[in-house]
Amino acid sequence: MDKVPMTVKGVAALREELDRLRTKERPRIVQAIAEARAQGDLRENAEYQYAREEQGFIEGRILEIEKKLAVVEVIDITRIPESDRVIFGTTVKLLNLNEDKKLTYQIVGDEESDIKLNKLSVNSPVARALIGKEVGDIALVKTPGGDVEYEICSVQHL
């Protein structure tokens, strides 16, 4: 099976979520199911039905996280010698030449990407255009609205 790249922080967040699901959420839902069962007839017991659905969601998420952690390749960008080249895990400051707008993104794995936190998936069109480029290079990204050019202003290993 192919390894999936992820940053140290991304793996830590997944492990934290897994621990929370196992130690807090799972026991809580088991208790809720037991309380609902004690109320009698389960066929018309909404609390029981809801608790069972939530239990299924929690167990599914636990399995999903365990599978991801089994194939993860942790990349600690702080241990890689700094250069001006954009690679997985680096934080890149860009200038959108079309809009004269400055942007900052970190290139991360799919699981940890979040555009609101300026974390771009390594598989996104923008990240694919940036990977391998160096400070001063221009990256061209083809979008449905037209081509967008980004100048790479700096690359940091944070």
Image (spheres, helix red, strand yellow):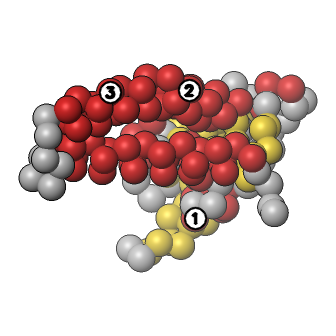
**Front label number (2 vs 1):** 2
Q: Position of residue 23 (x, y in %)?
A: 50, 23
Q: Report which quarter residue 6 is drawn in.
A: top right
* Element on which disc 3 rests: helix
Image quadrant assignment for residue 144: bottom left
Query: Residue 125 — which label?
Result: 1
Amino acid at pointer 3: Gln
The one of 33 and 78 positioned closer to us in this rendering: 33
Q: Secondary structure at mark 2?
A: helix
Task: Give the residue drawn at x 56%, y 26%.
Answer: 19
Across and down, in percent, residue 30 comes to: 37, 32
Report the residue marked by disc 3: 31
Residue 13, numbered label: none
**Is label 3 or label 2 in front?**
3
> Relative to the observer, which residue lies in front, 121 or 71?
71
> In this image, 62 relative to 7: left or right?
left
**In the image, 10: left or right of 135?**
left
**Of callouts 2 and 1, which one flags the residue occurring earlier in the amino acid sequence?**
2
Q: Position of residue 49 (x, y in %)?
A: 21, 49
